[in-house]
Image: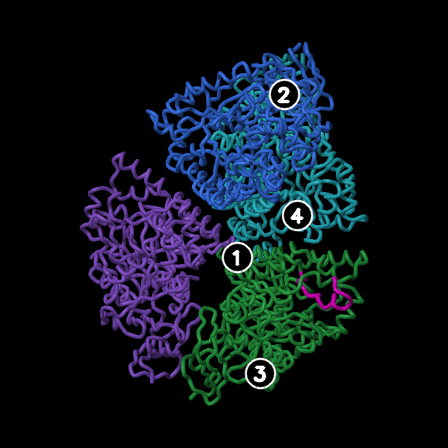
Chain colours: A purple, B green, C cyan, D blue
Amino acid sequence: MYELVIKKGRVINSDAAFTADVAVEDGKIAAVGAELAGRREIQAAGKLVIPGGVDTHLHFTLDLGGGLVSTDDFFTGSRAAALGGTTTVVPFIHPEEGESAAEAFNRRQREAVGQSVVDYGWHMNIGPEAFRRSGGVRSFVEETAALGISTYKLYMAYGYRLNDAQLLQAMEAIAGVGGLPVVHAENWELLSHLVQRAVDAGHRHPRWHEKTRPAEFEAEAAARVIAIARWVGLPVEIFHVGTREVVAQIRRARREGAAVYGETCPQYLFLNNGAFEREGIEAAYAVCAPPLRSEEDRRGMWQALAEDDLQIVSTDHCPFTKEQKRAGLQAGFHKIPGGVPSLEMRMAALYSEGVAKGRFSENRWVELCSTFPARLHGFAQKGVIAPGYDADLVVFDPAARRTITAEGLHEACGWTPYEGLELTGAVESTIVRGTPVVEQGRFTGERGIGGYRSRSGAL
Amino acid sequence: MYELVIKKGRVINSDAAFTADVAVEDGKIAAVGAELAGRREIQAAGKLVIPGGVDTHLHFTLDLGGGLVSTDDFFTGSRAAALGGTTTVVPFIHPEEGESAAEAFNRRQREAVGQSVVDYGWHMNIGPEAFRRSGGVRSFVEETAALGISTYKLYMAYGYRLNDAQLLQAMEAIAGVGGLPVVHAENWELLSHLVQRAVDAGHRHPRWHEKTRPAEFEAEAAARVIAIARWVGLPVEIFHVGTREVVAQIRRARREGAAVYGETCPQYLFLNNGAFEREGIEAAYAVCAPPLRSEEDRRGMWQALAEDDLQIVSTDHCPFTKEQKRAGLQAGFHKIPGGVPSLEMRMAALYSEGVAKGRFSENRWVELCSTFPARLHGFAQKGVIAPGYDADLVVFDPAARRTITAEGLHEACGWTPYEGLELTGAVESTIVRGTPVVEQGRFTGERGIGGYRSRSGAL
Amino acid sequence: MYELVIKKGRVINSDAAFTADVAVEDGKIAAVGAELAGRREIQAAGKLVIPGGVDTHLHFTLDLGGGLVSTDDFFTGSRAAALGGTTTVVPFIHPEEGESAAEAFNRRQREAVGQSVVDYGWHMNIGPEAFRRSGGVRSFVEETAALGISTYKLYMAYGYRLNDAQLLQAMEAIAGVGGLPVVHAENWELLSHLVQRAVDAGHRHPRWHEKTRPAEFEAEAAARVIAIARWVGLPVEIFHVGTREVVAQIRRARREGAAVYGETCPQYLFLNNGAFEREGIEAAYAVCAPPLRSEEDRRGMWQALAEDDLQIVSTDHCPFTKEQKRAGLQAGFHKIPGGVPSLEMRMAALYSEGVAKGRFSENRWVELCSTFPARLHGFAQKGVIAPGYDADLVVFDPAARRTITAEGLHEACGWTPYEGLELTGAVESTIVRGTPVVEQGRFTGERGIGGYRSRSGAL
Amino acid sequence: MYELVIKKGRVINSDAAFTADVAVEDGKIAAVGAELAGRREIQAAGKLVIPGGVDTHLHFTLDLGGGLVSTDDFFTGSRAAALGGTTTVVPFIHPEEGESAAEAFNRRQREAVGQSVVDYGWHMNIGPEAFRRSGGVRSFVEETAALGISTYKLYMAYGYRLNDAQLLQAMEAIAGVGGLPVVHAENWELLSHLVQRAVDAGHRHPRWHEKTRPAEFEAEAAARVIAIARWVGLPVEIFHVGTREVVAQIRRARREGAAVYGETCPQYLFLNNGAFEREGIEAAYAVCAPPLRSEEDRRGMWQALAEDDLQIVSTDHCPFTKEQKRAGLQAGFHKIPGGVPSLEMRMAALYSEGVAKGRFSENRWVELCSTFPARLHGFAQKGVIAPGYDADLVVFDPAARRTITAEGLHEACGWTPYEGLELTGAVESTIVRGTPVVEQGRFTGERGIGGYRSRSGAL
């Protein structure tokens, strides 16, 4: 008699699909099999039972300075995640000047502990300030690794960007602890020049957000950081790929045997640069960086997922309020805070467009959204339904039909660029390490049920 | 209380690895979990528990005519398979002129039923005679599919070869039943010309076996049949790939999005054309078609497995007796019956050179030798350890060390080209649909325990 | 005081362009320079002076049997060539069973001598009958080489096709004499099967001509013959390329360092498969083999010329009469005699669409239509305006505008698929080894002024 | 009766080879033909007559500051060029802060006028200071173009380097005048970091010069600048390519249709990184940037020339004195003034290893060393032997055999890294715009006979 058993669902792993009961004990999957009995049972006949989604790229209360803080905090964000079938999230720690790795970690932990309803890890940002610390970047990375963090965010854009020599040194430090760098790859020198030029010429419309960030230069940056990672001998993941030019660089490197990985996000799979032509504030909603690209690029991302040229779908969830978007729109495309809410819709959206429309299999869906992000990012106990793995489970109804609306979502920002999108398939129940937090599609969990998951390395 | 439980082994699937008990009931896996109790238990702590190997390419009593029959029959062959950790095999049905698909099936079944100690399916050969039947190839394929056979062997070599128009029609017929063609790809016109020329020039040495079958022309044949399959819109598997030229054709097609798959075999992974320079009869032992290639090619096959340019390791097990090899050697390279025994050593050999030497992961090992061959060939219930799948299980000791010798093997031919090869890892127990047939490395099974597995389609 | 001087034209070679006088003496270019005086002078100020066109693929009185003989004989054909700015042509010798190379050569020479108004060489066809001769194909090729013929046509289609082993042997023989094989590459087995199937299904419309010859299979044949040529170590030219699939095979081989060349023709540059949808007999006019392809393919051929993936533009000129086309149309697409008249329009058409529209330079135009075909096919004295080269010269008016009409052309067939095509640039004068045969756009030559040009090898 | 006639040589153009007299009048080629008579005649029977070499990359009196000035001045340098068969050179103008384009031009002209024995153009360097000028880089480029300069050097290394945004703006300015950027492509941030690290670790040996400049990062820089040029829509030439990694980037871009060109130099064709292991000062002699690479790279450069992946062979001639090299050697690899003398040996060396050893044809030799550099760099009157072109002519004895020694050369530095290299073929006479300056292999010219050649654009 197990603590909890999910009965008779069709279990989907990345390499198998079978009908079985899934038994949970002490937060772990205890058994997978026929005729398992539980003190509590969830009926799942006709439903899919999948390992909970793993979203390895999102922002909770991202502080851009000047009062610009992204909308979801750990509670509202993790609740939206759980409602969307995601049971593990990985936001970022942005250390302040002079703050130790441990201090920054503790600061952020205070925002999460007691709040999060899903498990979480942290990416550590490495910025130029890490090089000014005593002990330098190497010591900073070692301190970070000691905190159970194995993934490091490197920016090639914004004030926080590293130059090439810093990228190389950061990667050497990461290699020293067996970690993984995840990279925002853009050519900042070129795009900031083009932005300034457009601004000087009087352009303000959001469409200039894309025009001033040519795909060729995004691909240049990706190729550059891949070259550095290959020289160091380190795997590398390129974040938020939205253009076929970057896919080509990743594919080329992979085909030469390099451990290079690419992530895309719902915004690059469901939206194109036509969104910049929407009326009023909606054009501002669509602003994120790198920008949305052409319809051919959008379709190319789906193809890249099917052909394993991209390996992960995360969200880069980072919405700002309507007011913040509106203020940016008035000030000009370069002042619009970038970010789109995709956290809650990810799993169902990928099922609907990916599986239900025949672009890839149920197994691939699970692999893209759960198994592989867990593996690459070092969550050894997540992403698979098998004994001993964390009992992060989602019961998914493949036949349900939903329409996305801002009201229907639980993200804090109150708007969505996907308004009206019709989806096949919906999350019915979500279980975080053995505890149901979503039942019948409604949030029934408690704050703080999710916990920090320490990692000792990456793939 | 289950019928049988394998206790505390490290379970390896293609996408996961975890420690668990595996419970068996009625020939199926009933549960995978902690603390499962069985009326019978096999202790596996410290051992790997893997889905039984699936060998989708081998010959039992292959009759070449003129009294040349390959050595292993269904009993000795399946026993060797079981001892080597393989629980499913797929030999061939070669229909005779005028014999219906069902008659040919029944004739072969009589050799297998009551003899086989592992499960089996059949490939159906499609030769020119299929086109002379009433109803033609389409009707022949439909009859075959009705027998639960979903894979079809097409030869581009030997008297049994099809011409290009026949290949196309055979593929259309196979597409009609959702089957998979598996192909022996060589350019018969070219190689038979080069063989004749070499024979006319007085060459007899086995090294001429390779010299008269240039890799470029093997690749030409592969490219040709791939082109035909792509036009028809059918997946295709190229059998026994041993040269990088063929790998390049497969890779190219796959990268263009085509459903093309490649298999290699232990002989191409452990031997090179240096074997043709061995003393006396040993040079004849090494003869198989396509031939062994250069050391660079041999290493290239390992790389192709690691990088997913090849997807399956089967054996093409087809040994003839020493006497038959010797007679061939005296008559000349073109008269040596081709075939090498690799059936019993496959799983351990791949573990030893692949996993223990760090070429790929345990998961990939299972995927290459069990999960993917099962999936591609339509064995929906095999290749994964999960509830509901067939309880085909192998307990593998990763620390054991063995040296291959002809005496130590249980194949009927009495010789091996791998004499003296040292391996890390060995099969300890093999369970076929719930029944142990190998225990402590010794055969303890009974004839006939294995059964025919009907299939309704391929990947 | 030279025999003849062309005054003050802009001389275009493949690597240079300059204004100079071109002096002729004894059929050769005697000098190129300023202030050269001639007993006769042609004024060319404002005009281009180019080396005469070299058309290395065309048919005069091609006899398909059953009374089907292509329309232009040596006089009408060579006159059309001259009017179009072509001063060297290379038709084919088709040896009959039992006829020696010399006999076949003499038979064809009788049709040409005293008739041709331009110079000519011959391609020798090598068919299956060459293998039945005493001495075999090697002896046949040696006899042919002794006649000053260095290029050999190999068919992979029609009754005259060679199988792969014959292709290999023919190429070995050609390699022995330093010759060049030129190949009609199609997969006859596949296309004849598809044709038969279409005919059996009742299809008769010319559009089925293309549908039954898939580009993938044309590319397969090209890849196959390229593989054989590379194995033999021989250059090879693929004739009449009209699809990007074949271009891809040529490009791939070239980029691997192989001496592989590709030719396209005006029909693949100016027409697409939309021509099969024209009304009535015009649909039949467009039938040639390989067939016209898509608009994307058509544009792809221009790109391939610009990027040197294709190296030659010849014509495969082979028109049949309206009556013959009409009879074929009634009998069905497979009975329409294939062939399009492109001989007279080639040079101007390539100038108009290629140079005037900015696709490539004047130099590339000359290279594609004259310099490189001359070089590859062994016409060491042709294709360049420099002292010692044959005085084959064309004065071309780059500003003239012409509209193609059947009446305006001088080809014998009386129809053209290019009716109404407007061209920029026109041939004004043509000089064959020092003798003007076209002046002010009108034919002023005499029968028989052209001569046979013996060659001792190919590039 | 012409002023000068070169009699009966074998004239080699990039697209033709023929025996003819070449007549000169007023510094131009007046005629090419048979039986031309001159007031002066040079007998060339049995010799090759080629267009004079064009060396589009070399340094005369390059001032690195601190008294480090490269050795050859305009007289000794141009004399060495002439003795080596080069009749046009293109050194650099390095404008000083505050100096106008015209002032810088005039300053450099004063060093050349009355000194040079061959014709010359100038590259204009564009450094960061160009962006500080009033009118900015656009105005600076326009002033430069007005001086007849059409090629612009952009550095991605050294203090003079441009950042990416400056590269983009410089290219836009160059595009505005139809010019060509030529680029020193290295990733300065990365290499200067690696150099500093090596120096800090105590490394001083010249072999560290290569170790600190990984080929992958040289390729990164090339890819980056190519991306920028493609975005601007401008052709670009990558200077001094010595590694296959850079060749791969150039090839890739060219195959995508981009106007990208690559140059290599004798040092990358005749030396490899083994030179850094030579005894004593000889290890310092080999230092140049980018560094010499592996033997596989060296051979790769020859292959790239043959296959048109590289298009130009220039020299980057920039030798310093033995004393300067020695002082650098003592101070450490990073202090050795980089530069190798290759000016005088280029034409013969390329003939010997390229043509005489069968790597490419005589025509390709002329194309690489004269025709194409002239064309790409806008010397419309050079690089071809045809009427109206400048009478820059070289009589080359293909049968002569020479051994390179420092004493035998006429470069000012007094040493050569090619000591002892045996060459087939030697320059016999060199004629600069009609005036012989080298006769029978000896310098017979006068200072100042060469002149500045204004250009109005590039290819």
Relative to C110, residue B452 above or below: below
Residue B386 is labelled as: none
Residue beneath label 2, please?
D393
Query: Nearest the camera: D344 or B52?
Result: D344
Give the distance between the C-alpha atoms of the residues marked 1 and 4, in whole angstroms: 26 Å
Residue beneath label 4, please?
C230
- Foreground tag (2 vs 4): 2
- Foreground tag (2 vs 1): 2
Residue D311 painted magenta: no
The picture quadrant where one finds residue B33 is bottom left
Residue beneath label 3, please?
B440
Judge the density around disc 3: few (<14), some (14-19), many (≥20) Cα neighbours within 10 Å: few
- What percent of the width, then of the height, locates residue D303? 61, 40
Badge 3 amino acid:
Gln
Residue beneath label 1, please?
B231
Q: Are marks 1 and 4 in contact (CB under 8 Å)?
A: no
Badge 2 amino acid:
Leu
- What percent of the width, then of the height, locates residue A259? 47, 56
Relative to A395, residue D315 above or below: above
The picture quadrant where one finds residue B215 is bottom right
Q: State the count of labels.
A: 4
Badge 1 amino acid:
Trp
- What percent of the width, then of the height, locates residue A30? 37, 78
Question: Quarter holding the N terminus of chain D?
Answer: top right
Chain ID of residue with mark 2: D
